[in-house]
Amino acid sequence: MQPAETIYIDEDTVGCDGGGGALGHPLVYLTLSPRGHVDCPYCGRHYVQTEAGKAAGGGHGH
């Protein structure tokens, strides 16, 4: 089994669908703050907020 993919983002909310089109999973929205990171409960992708995103107070949810 491959380790989970780590994705760096500037936002504080991310939508994850597994990235596999029809082979993905239902779209879920995950909040990174206040910890600055979160794992998708479906596919295990690890989302990490960049320092620039933390300094800007996150994004606007897109």
Image (tube, rainbow, N blue to C red):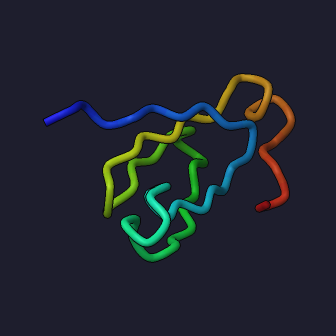
Q: How many marks?
A: 0
Residue 35 relative to residue 10: left or right: left
Q: Residue furthest left?
A: 1
Q: Measuring from the top left, give residue 12's x and y in whole percent.
A: 69, 49
Q: Position of residue 18 (x, y in %)?
A: 44, 58
Out of 40 and 23, give the one closest to the viewer: 23
Q: Residue at x 54, y 34 (%)?
A: 7
Examine the image and state in which quarter residue 56 appears.
top right
| Residue appearing at x 60%, y 31% in the figure | 8
Instruction: Report x, y in % for residue 35.
Output: 52, 41
Q: Residue at x 81, y 29 (%)?
A: 55
Residue at the front extreme, as displayed: 22
Question: Quadrant of the rendered structure where residue 30 is?
Answer: bottom right
In the rendered image, which quarter contains the C terminus?
bottom right
Q: State the residue lying farthest toward the bottom.
A: 26
Rendered view: 28 above or below 49: below
Q: Which residue is more in the foreground, 27 or 21?
A: 21
Q: At which x and y percent is residue 36?
A: 57, 38
Say which quarter of the image contains residue 49.
top right
The N terminus is located in which quarter? top left
Depth check, front residue: 49 or 42: 42
Residue 37 lies, with reference to residue 50, above or below; the image says below
